[in-house]
Image (cartoon, rainbow, N blue to C red):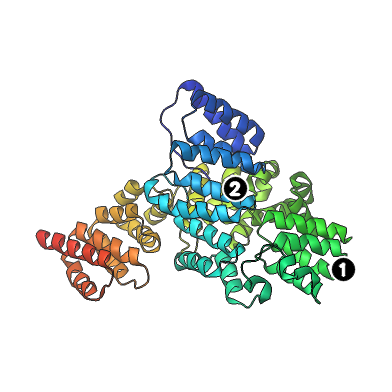
Amino acid sequence: MSGWFFKKKTEDEDKLWNEAMSQMESGDYKKAIKKFSDFIELEPEKIDPYLMRGQAYVKLKKLNEAIKDFSKVLELNPDNGDAYYLRGQAYSLNGEFEKAVEDFKLTLEKIPLSPGFSVNKYSVHLSLGIELFKLGRYKEAEIHLEEVLAVSPNNETAQTIMKQIRQKVGPIAQSKGYESMEKKNIFNNSDKMGSLIHTAKHGPFFQKEAVKALGEMGDKRAIAPLVEILKNEFQSLTRQAAADSLEKLGWEPVNDTDKAYMLIAREKWKELAELGVEYLILALRWPNEREVMPYFVEVGKAAVEPLIKVLENKDCDQRSIAKVLGRLGDIRAAVPLAQILKDQGVDYDIKREVAEALNKLDFEPRNDTEKAYLLVAAKRWNEAAELGEPAVESLILVLRRLGWPEAREALAKIGKPAVEPLIQALGDPYVAWARFSAATALGKIGDKRAVKPLTQLLKNEKDEVIKEAIEKALEKIKTKM
């Protein structure tokens, strides 16, 4: 994660900071940590080096050190949403799911107090849904996952977890309040293998432990589900456990694809790169871009077309692919990346990474509409507003999906060309912030075309805050008529 902005530093600090960030970008986390530590000695009260050093510690799996850094940020600024979010991620990787839930909830509370917050709030909802699912708190998880799917209906992670919640996943996942697998007699029932496979594949409790137990049993029937986990499980620690169990069972990869997934689980990136670029790309199904970046750089231009193909098929972590393509600097990637900016199903934190990649490619938009999508993804609101009507489409999409006030203000600046799309946004029955933002923007524009739809909405609206916004908008319009 990136995007924090800093005041002018001294020349020495600036040089030190740039060196540290360069090492982060190249994946040399140990050296980056040393540079960030040197920076902290010079400026112990600054927040940003702690945030960045904490992320470097996470990459090196030094989670306790990362948690300390993020906690230090919160000592310096208790309202820093980024620190809560990053610490929540570290807690999750450390298996401290309850603490992760608490931090993600605090992240949502702190977003309004963190104007430079670097993460889309729906990414926080997704993280909360995942952690609550792990803890078996399905109803709570469902609430947060529905928030994600309301704005990103094609989000595969949210869809997958919701499907598991709504299916009958058996007595293991339905049971609540137990402290160990033995307490529920998981290892001593008549169908030990079936129960372990079920837990290993579906969780949410003791998934990694079940994967390990399958390897210890020595039963070859476990190989097929373990290979499936090796290739598809999101959690890296569970995939590592699957690799361990498969080795205990005497399984050997039957082809290069199987070998690649085993190497990914083992994080043996050099050996993976030696298999070929098509196998290196498999690592980007998960957010491993920093680890594999140096190997893509070695491959160079030959990696571009395969990366574009995977990007267009959406069989990857699009954020990771965008970062790699931006680093490779080949203009062939520009048009496919620009197309992602218009995709309504793509989260805006991904679009921001795409915008950064396009900037590295010195991409020149082909028209003002495309330029507007780029500016909006980069959150350059004033420049988007200056484009006028061509920016309305991209800004309305943000307003309806996320309700960001910056999009609302930009539409208000554009004025009359935005009126009809804003009127249409008033009719969204499911997204309250869209109605609120549209009414507020229409009031600022002051166009009489909005009077009738606003009056009609006022009659039917049940939300008192939105009703108040409509009344204020009507008053403003009447003063301008």
Circle 1 is placed at which residue position? 220
Q: Which amino acid lies under the numbered mark 1 shown in the image of this protein?
A: Lys
Circle 2 is placed at which residue position? 90
Q: Tell me the element at label 2.
A: helix
Q: Which amino acid lies under the numbered mark 2 shown in the image of this protein?
A: Ala
Q: Tell me the element at label 1.
A: helix
In the depicted view, which residue is nearer to us: 43 or 385?
A: 43
Query: Could you say where residue 148 lies in the image, as x and y percent from the top left?
Result: 48, 64
Circle 1 packing at 10 Å, graded few (<14), some (14-19), many (20+), is few
In the depicted view, which residue is nearer to us: 186 or 157?
A: 186
In the depicted view, which residue is nearer to us: 395 or 166?
A: 166
Task: State left or right for residue 403 relative to residue 469.
Answer: right
Residue 379 vs 209, above or below: the answer is: above
Q: Is residue 325 visible?
A: no
| Residue shown at the point (46%, 40%) measured from the top left | 4
Query: Could you say where residue 218 lies in the image, as x and y percent from the top left?
Result: 88, 64
In the depicted view, which residue is nearer to us: 262 or 270?
A: 262
Residue 32, by quadrant, is top right
Residue 380 vs 286, above or below: the answer is: above
